[in-house]
Image: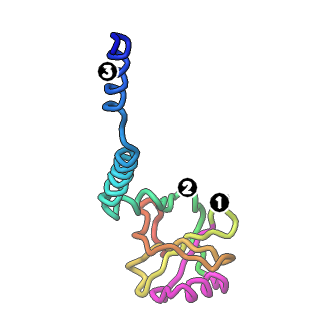
Amino acid sequence: MSMIDTLELRKNAETRQLATPGWLRWAAGLLVIAAFVVAGLREPPDTAAQRAVKAPVAGDYQGDWRNGQHVDLEKTLSANHVDSCGLMAYRAHRTVHGQYLVYCSQDGRRWTAWLAWPGAQKVMGPYAPDPLVPAPR
């Protein structure tokens, strides 16, 4: 065996040792994905909820509270099982047509806030009343 053949054998042996098996690359990829999933699951639900929903802002719902009947709002609240709305006051969003901030109460002192879209029959809430939006009188 010549010197060139010996060097060629050593080169091939080193290359084979450095090659990563395909199953090992797949396993490493799965571990990375699993780490991201676990990290996402460790986030407290309250934090995720606060990030997902923007609380009502006083600037978005300006003007006086309306206490008159709003049949579509009442139907939407009823369809979404909002039963704590013996007294209802609402304000329309200043730029989004068909979106309302609704405050509900049974006694006129303790209020809960809801966001309602009567056209879509959708309600989000309950929320604590926004301190920047004074309660209805």
User: In the picture shown, does residue 132 fall above or below 125?
Assistant: above
Mark 3 closeness class: few <14, some 14–19, many ≥20 residues within 10 Å: few
Q: Earlier in the sequence, mark 1 or mark 2?
A: 2
Q: Nearer the viewer, residue 73 or 135?
A: 73
SS of the residue under disc 3: helix
Residue lying at 31% horizontally and 21% vertically, measured from the top left: 10
Q: Residue tagged by mark 1? A: 94
Q: CA distance from mark 3 to mark 2?
A: 75 Å
Residue lying at 49% horizontally and 75% vertically, measured from the top left: 103
Which corner quadrant of the image does residue 121 belong to?
bottom right
Instruction: Tell me the amino acid under the disc marked 3.
Output: Arg
SS of the residue under disc 2: loop
Residue lying at 37% horizontally and 56% vertically, measured from the top left: 37
Residue 38 located left or right of residue 56: left
Residue 50 at x, y = what percent? 40, 60
Residue 77 located left or right of residue 32: right
**Range of residues picked out in magenta:** 68-92
In the rendered image, the residue lying farthest to the top is 3
Q: Nearer the viewer, residue 87 or 20?
A: 20
Marks 1 & 2, CB-CB < 8 Å contact: yes
Q: Which mark is residue 59?
A: 2
Q: Earlier in the sequence, mark 3 or mark 2?
A: 3
Q: Earlier in the sequence, mark 3 or mark 1?
A: 3
- Assess whether residue 74 is covered by the magenta stretch: yes
Mark 1 closeness class: few <14, some 14–19, many ≥20 residues within 10 Å: some
Q: Residue tagged by mark 3? A: 10
Which corner quadrant of the image does residue 97 belong to?
bottom right
Q: Nearer the viewer, mark 3 or mark 2?
A: 3
